[in-house]
Amino acid sequence: MECYLDNGATTAVSPSAVAAAKRAMEEVWGNPSSLHRRGIDAFLLLQQCRETVAGVLGCDREEVTFTSGATESNNLALFGAARAKKRRGNRIVTTAFEHSSVIAAAGKLETEGFEVIFVPPEPDGTLPAEKIAQAVDENTILVSTMLVNNELGTVLDIPKIGRLIRRKNKEVLFHCDGVQAFCKIPFKVSRLGVDLMSVSAHKIHGPKGVGALYVKKGVRIQPLLYGGAQEKKLRPGTEGVPMIAAFAAAAQESAQKMLPSQEKVAELNRVLRERLAALDGVVLNSPADASPYILNLSVLGIRSEIMLHALEEQGIYVSSGSACAKGEPSHVLSAMGMERSRADSALRISFTYESTMEEVEMLVETLTSLIPRFRQGKKGTVHI
């Protein structure tokens, strides 16, 4: 039995998404900007997909811009908003445990003369809305925070953050990285109080290489790319209709399964937490009220990569943090002030609606077997 518990990194592409992409490639392969029938058919499919994704997000279809994924969406939001608003101020507020595509983009903006405030989380992995709002002043032009942290599962109170920051500065633009929340936590983007939101297909059983940026009606940001008139000139270039079709199919299916799966995933998380608490030297890093889809833990004294590969040999796939970090020390855990030895032994377990209790049991039983062998191995030789 294969046990895949790294759904925060990517998910298996659903059959419905594969079928949608295949149909678009074989039957609706025209350029959606062409004025003949082939182009019109592709354009109509593109608009249908935009309508579907907008419906899942809870916004108008004109507010959805398709991109190559969350990294591009995050970069477009940060650079586009900062450069559009630079005459009004130069402060950007974000958190110290954002995804690397936000952290790196914010760092680049610092080199362009913007002042960037990285608000650190609390030692328990939470981050109160008030702490973010405190960093906002009259010179602030952009606030960027994630809805669900990709390593810890911390859920930020986005509506409250929005209310507090606008009490201090009504002109600030508010961007939210919604990647780990989209189709997992119920929300309507139009009710969150954000101006911009990034989402991605491959976290919800769609293909890699496609995502979207929600841009609230009336909000103006600058593009990163220049060329044709596609995507209202905000993201020029011929749209990848097959990938977008697969994205829309995955979003629709995931949205339909979200509410029925909530209780199931919460139970998987609860049982895993309970079973891990009984294991010697295992500590949980995720907050108690984190998203049930993500659970971060440390097996003290055993480095992440050692345990990760030992689990892999047993057919169990987890991660040591964000896949984008590629084995580098976690900036998320460092931002919490976690001691290096505990951070170096961290593992991230992440679920999807397809996850099962059998997978949880397999993980716990394997950890129960491996941990004593590694502990004994410190005194002698251990064979996995």
Image: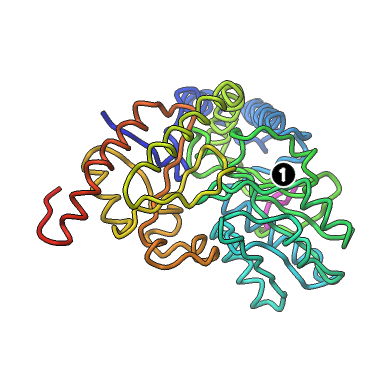
Placement of 314 over or under 222, stated as above or below: above
Q: Mark 1 points at which residue?
A: 214
Q: In this view, does 313 lie to the left or right of 265?
A: left
x, y percentage for residue 126?
Answer: 61, 54
Placement of 113 over or under 92, stated as above or below: below
x, y percentage for residue 160?
Answer: 78, 48
Q: Is residue 58 left or right of residue 70?
A: right
| Residue 233: in magenta span | yes
x, y percentage for residue 129?
Answer: 73, 55
Image quarter of residue 30: top right
**Residue located 45% across and 23% down the image:** 15
| Residue 229: in magenta span | yes
Question: Mark 1: which amino acid?
Answer: Tyr
**Residue located 74% across and 33% down the image:** 58
Placement of 275 over or under 371, stated as above or below: above
Image quarter of residue 97: bottom right
Q: What stretch is highlighted in magenta?
A: 226-234
